[in-house]
Image (cartoon, rainbow, N blue to C red):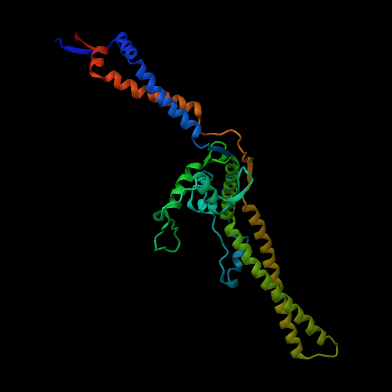
């Protein structure tokens, strides 16, 4: 069974004739778009990108009780035994640390150095340069009255700033090599490098504090116990020496003196053993603290860029030309009279 269908064909000669007849309109509109694109490309704020790279120590922290230290649990009622665990902050999560709200709030307080040599707070730089010194509306400066404990309450202005900074300050990790790259885009090349350096320092310090927090608590606890045990040991030592000086004559043979001497000897030995054992464990805990401290290698420190990253003027100009042509050609081609000439339908039996 045969049926007829319409096949649309394009008459390229007619298309050329239509475009030629409208050449001045096409050139005029395209020229306007091009001028607008070039004007934007040369007036848009310049942005510079600085990047730093660090190689973290990839490890699985397995903390165990400090070799018999569990025997000292009764001292001070402190539980020193630790279970084996795995580091909760994996290297692939490190870039998320510099995308957190606390990081940006701390960044706002930091001093940065501009290309002109001025030192100013980053918040001041952001307001003067990125925000062009625009005065914020009162509604964007207000915060909620209720401020629950343990949460962060910011105004709309700070919220918008953090949203923009998340686009400007980014981190990524190469899963094969483990290298973490931190990239910062700022209108000032020196500030961009300065902020990148701060982000790297913040990341390494945060991870170091996280991994060593428990070990630091042990060192601090044992340090206090060693100081207390040392005091008791020295006290017993002094009492023993003083008593020996008083009853050192061979003619003195009092039974009560012998009993007191044995008690002093017992207290001295006990305080000496406790002090020496705690001192040993204290040194062991300091060694474990050193072992738990991660090592970061800076592969590429941030460099102050001399070439801007944005705006890409040639690409903007070409994009303006393409957009201008699109906006002028589509209406011309789709005008009813032109469309009938250019697009012809033929019937075909199939």
Image point (49%, 45%), residue name: 132
Image point (60%, 59%), residue name: 215
- In the displayed structure, does residue 195 sit left or right of residue 26? right
Please count the marks in the image: 0
Q: Between residues 283 and 67, which one lies in front from this camera angle?
A: 283
The answer to whether residue 61 is seen in the rendering is no
Examine the image and state in which quarter residue 142 appears. Answer: bottom left
Rendered view: 78 above or below 201: below
- In the displayed structure, does residue 141 sit left or right of residue 92? left
At which x and y percent is residue 47?
A: 53, 37
Rendered view: 6 above or below 234: above
Q: Between residues 275 and 260, which one lies in front from this camera angle?
A: 275
Examine the image and state in which quarter residue 216 appears. Answer: bottom right
Rendered view: 42 above or below 59: above
Q: Between residues 238 and 88, which one lies in front from this camera angle?
A: 88
Q: Residue furthest left?
A: 1
At which x and y percent is residue 293?
A: 62, 52
Q: Between residues 281 and 260, which one lies in front from this camera angle?
A: 281
Tell me the quadrant of the picture where the N terminus can be found. top left
At which x and y percent is residue 94?
A: 53, 46
The answer to whether residue 103 is seen in the rendering is yes
Q: Residue furthest right?
A: 250
At which x and y percent is residue 214?
A: 57, 59
Tell me the quadrant of the picture where the C terminus can be found. top left
Image point (51%, 37%), residue name: 45
């Amino acid at each position: 069974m045969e049926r007829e269908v319409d096949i649309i064909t394009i008459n390229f000669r007619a298309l050329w004739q239509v475009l030629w007849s409208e050449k001045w309109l096409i050139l005029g509109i395209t020229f306007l778009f091009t001028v607008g694109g070039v004007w934007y490309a040369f007036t848009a704020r310049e942005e510079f990108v600085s990047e730093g790279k660090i190689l973290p120590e990839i490890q699985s922290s397995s903390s165990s009780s400090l070799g018999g230290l569990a025997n000292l649990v009764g001292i001070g009622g402190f539980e020193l035994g630790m279970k084996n665990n795995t580091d909760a902050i994996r290297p692939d999560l490190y870039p998320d640390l510099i995308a957190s709200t606390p990081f940006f709030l701390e960044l706002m307080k930091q001093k940065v150095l501009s290309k002109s040599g001025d030192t100013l707070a980053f918040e001041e730089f952001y307001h003067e340069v990125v925000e062009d010194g625009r005065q914020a509306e009162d509604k964007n400066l207000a915060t909620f009255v209720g401020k629950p404990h343990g949460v962060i309450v910011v105004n709309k202005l700070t919220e918008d700033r953090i949203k923009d900074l998340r686009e400007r300050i980014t981190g990524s990790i190469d899963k094969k090599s483990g290298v973490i790259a931190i990239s910062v885009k700022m209108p000032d090349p020196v500030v961009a490098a300065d902020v990148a350096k701060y982000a790297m320092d913040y990341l390494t310090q945060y991870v170091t504090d996280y991994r060593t927090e428990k070990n630091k608590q042990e060192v601090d606890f044992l340090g206090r116990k060693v100081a207390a045990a040392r005091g008791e040991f020295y006290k017993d030592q002094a009492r023993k020496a003083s008593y020996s000086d008083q009853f050192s004559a061979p003619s003195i043979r009092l039974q009560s003196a012998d009993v007191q001497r044995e008690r002093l000897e017992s207290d001295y030995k006990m305080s000496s053993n406790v002090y020496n054992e705690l001192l040993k464990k204290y040194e062991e805990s300091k060694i474990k603290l050193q072992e738990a401290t991660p090592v970061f290698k800076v592969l590429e420190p941030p460099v102050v860029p001399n070439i801007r990253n944005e705006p890409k003027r040639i690409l903007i100009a070409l994009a303006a030309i393409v957009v201008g042509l699109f906006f002028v050609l589509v209406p011309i081609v789709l005008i009813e009279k032109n469309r009938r000439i250019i697009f012809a339908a033929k019937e075909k039996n199939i």
